Amino acid sequence: MRRKSRAGGMNLREKILRVLRSYSPDKIKIATLGSHSALNILRGAKDEGFETICLCRREDAIVYKNFGIADKIVELKEFDELLSKDLQDLLREENAILIPHGSFNAYIGKLDDLEVPIFGNRKLMEYETSREKQREWFLRAGVRIPKEFESPEKIDRLCIVKFQGAKGGRGYFLVTSAEDFKKKAKEILSRGLATEEELSRAEIQEYIIGANVYFSFFYSPVNDRVELISIDRRYEHIDGIGRIPAKEQLKLDFEPTYTVIGNIPLVLRESLLKQAFDVAEKIVSVSKEIAYPGMVGPFCVETVFNERAELIVFEISARIVAGTNVGIPNSPYSYVLFGENMYMGRRIAREIRLAIEKDMLEEVIY
Ligand code: AMP
Ligand code: AMP
């Protein structure tokens, strides 16, 4: 059984290419799940002249109808209906290319059964669900990362306990010792913020005190270059803590979490950009070794700058992140680079358009 599924996995790219070759290049449509960064993606597709399809949950249809950026709306009960035969048939008939985002990771997970062309590299997207694999990627790239603690007993400094996958920081907590870990883990479990299994697979990472910066890059196979599209920082539940004076904080018994609520655009000191480009180039270079054909399209490098303004990477997402929503219709960086309105959703559609024109579509699809 296992061998069979592995063989299926090996043939996946061939299957996808076969589907892609059955498409008429001038009839290609852009499709995505209605959530996360769908407004960004669909607006971008329209700006580049594509017809669009939005697959959304029934209750969210009101949002996508309201914005008028979906030429076709398909209502679903749950996002994982995307894997159903009927829906996949429909997408193939429509000549659709799917643009994956955080909800593909969060609500669907493994994309091996999805035989519809995806923009980007679905193998690299899977790295997001395994912190161990990400760590390997970073180590091979030689980028600086926080220290990792194998077990709670080894904790000797301020650490952050993080769960696997794109959970948007939900349930993360800070600990300073093994006892502290035990106490807080119990609390997290009783509050239903994580399961025993999730807790046992959680990553215990040195907490880097500093300024968080999220870089959204785009690797363009058409232009063969890394492009900085926008920078943001997150607005998280814990950010509210600063509104309560320390005196009151001490009297309260509460655990703030890192649950993300939104994003705030950011412009970096120009002298710090070099470190970010350096890391992005290294990450892209190693991506080609670990998952053919390597990075394609959007990726986000999540970092903290420490007290010496040194960049430390704590996570990577090999897809569009919701932080790029702050860059519509442009960010200072995309404007400098393109001299026109450019944002991640549009940049993706532009790459597809250029790839169609240059007969390079097979290089940006998996
Ligand atoms: P949603 O459709 O809002 O449930 O988002 C899908 C997944 O992406 C969830 O796992 C969220 O935690 C994550 N997500 C959504 N928005 C953001 C954001 N602005 N920053 C980081 N993660 C996010
Ligand atoms: P992540 O799920 O890895 O994107 O982390 C969610 C949030 O936790 C980030 O936005 C940061 O605020 C925080 N965080 C994660 N890892 C670290 C770290 N090693 N040091 C400091 N803050 C972190």
Image (cartoon, grey):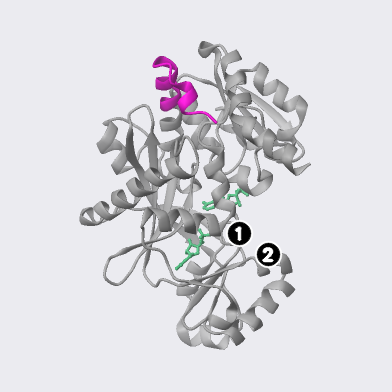
Check disc 1: other Cα within 10 Å, few if <14, some if 14-19, many if 20+: some
Q: Nearer the viewer, residue 64 or 287?
A: 287
SS at mark 2 in the image: helix
Residue 323 forms part of the magenta stretch:
no
Q: Which residue is mark 2?
A: 198
Q: Quadrant of the N terminus?
A: top right
| CB under 8 Å between discs 1 and 2 | yes
Q: Most prominent secondary structure in the magenta stretch? A: helix
**Residue in view at x 72 percent, y 22 percent:** 89
> Residue 237 versus residue 146: which sits nearer the camera?
146
Q: Residue visible at 55% across and 31% down?
A: 366
Numbered circle sitting on residue 164: 1
Mark 1: which amino acid? Answer: Gln
* Residue sitting at x 55%, y 33%: 99
The spot of residue 288 in percent (x, y) is 43, 40
Amino acid at circle 2: Glu
Segment colored magenta: 350-366
Residue nearer the viewer, 183 or 358: 358
Figure check: 144 above or below 89? below
> Tag 1, which secondary structure?
loop
Residue 220's quadrant in the figure?
A: top left
